[in-house]
Amino acid sequence: MMKCLALDDEPLALEIIADFAAKAPVPMQLKTFENAALALRYLQEEPVDLIFLDIKMPDITGIQFLKSLKQPPMVIFTTAYEEYALDGFELNVVDYLLKPIPFERFMKAVIRAQEHLSVTQPRTAETDYIFVKTEYKIIKINIEDILYIEALKDYIKIYTAHQPVLTLKSLKSFESRLPKDKFMRVHRSYLVAMNKINSVERNTVMIANQSIPISEGYRDRFYDVITRYS
């Protein structure tokens, strides 16, 4: 089930999107809003996979709304104005639909979003890799290659055996994609691969010649785990 939100100041436009979503072969759960402030409040409580976003609205443009989101989901612009297509490209939106939107064109955009979601959604127990979006591409990272992950405000930096990868995501959400028996938080800003630890001394973990702090809030649980194997 793909969780979706549609924001448009025109009720008829929202009705069309809702009708199309109900007919789509892709399972979709859709919430519609005419008011940007209410939509933003909803997103703070209920994260979604995809937003259908109008561009020209009375109080805020769709572009301003998108830029206001710290960790935006996939976005499909829905607008009657062609001149914003370049903005959509620069903001890395999934698609750009011109009104009036044909159902066939709507479906093409939704399928594209579903394909994107299929390679970025949380991993299953059977896989030993994840896909991560960085800049304008999606790269594959083998779980075994990850050394540790560092939180940097709205981004995380994934340190691997080959090179670091920067992606727009919270450490908490990324942690949920990793096997719990192989990775552990040692600090609010650090998540480490247990099998990559070289040594532990007082409040520090050493991985690949890098010193990583162990904070007080995570210390007891961390030491409880490692002492089981000592």
Image: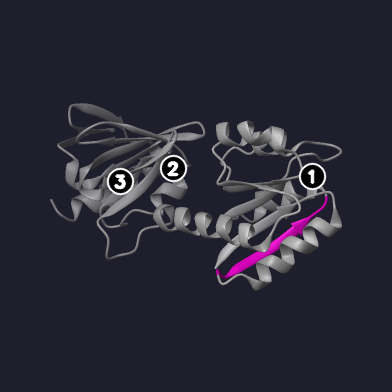
Name the amino acid type tagged 3: Lys
Name the amino acid type tagged 1: Ala
Closer to the camera, 8 or 176?
A: 8
Residue 40: horizontal and vertical position, in percent?
A: 72, 46
Residue 229: horizontal and vertical position, in percent?
A: 15, 54
The residue mark sitting in front, 3 or 2, is 3
Task: Please check the rendered image and state whether residue 33 is part of the magenta-colored stretch, yes or no.
Answer: yes
Name the amino acid type tagged 2: Leu
Distance from Cα at disc 3 to Cα at disc 2:
18 Å
Who's the residue at 64% across and 67% down the image?
29
Who's the residue at 69% across and 66% down the image?
20
Disc on the earlier residue, 3 or 2: 3
Closer to the camera, 201 or 31?
A: 31
Report helix, strand or loop for mark 1: helix
Left or right of residue 228: residue 66: right
The residue mark sitting in front, 1 or 2, is 1
Dominant secondary structure of the residues highlighted in magenta in the image: strand
Q: Which mark is residue 171?
A: 2
Report the residue marked by disc 1.
37
Task: Please check the rendered image and state whether residue 68 is part of the magenta-colored stretch, yes or no.
Answer: no
Disc on the earlier residue, 3 or 1: 1
Disc on the earlier residue, 1 or 2: 1
Left or right of residue 101: residue 24: left
Q: What stretch is highlighted in magenta?
A: 26-34
Residue 134: horizontal and vertical position, in percent?
A: 41, 36
| Residue 228 against residue 88 in the figure, above or below | below
Q: Residue 140 carries which label?
A: 3
At label 1, counting other C-alpha atoms closer than 10 Å, the crowd grade (few under 14, some 14-19, many 20 or more) is: few
The residue mark sitting in front, 3 or 1, is 3
Q: Residue 122 carries which label?
A: none
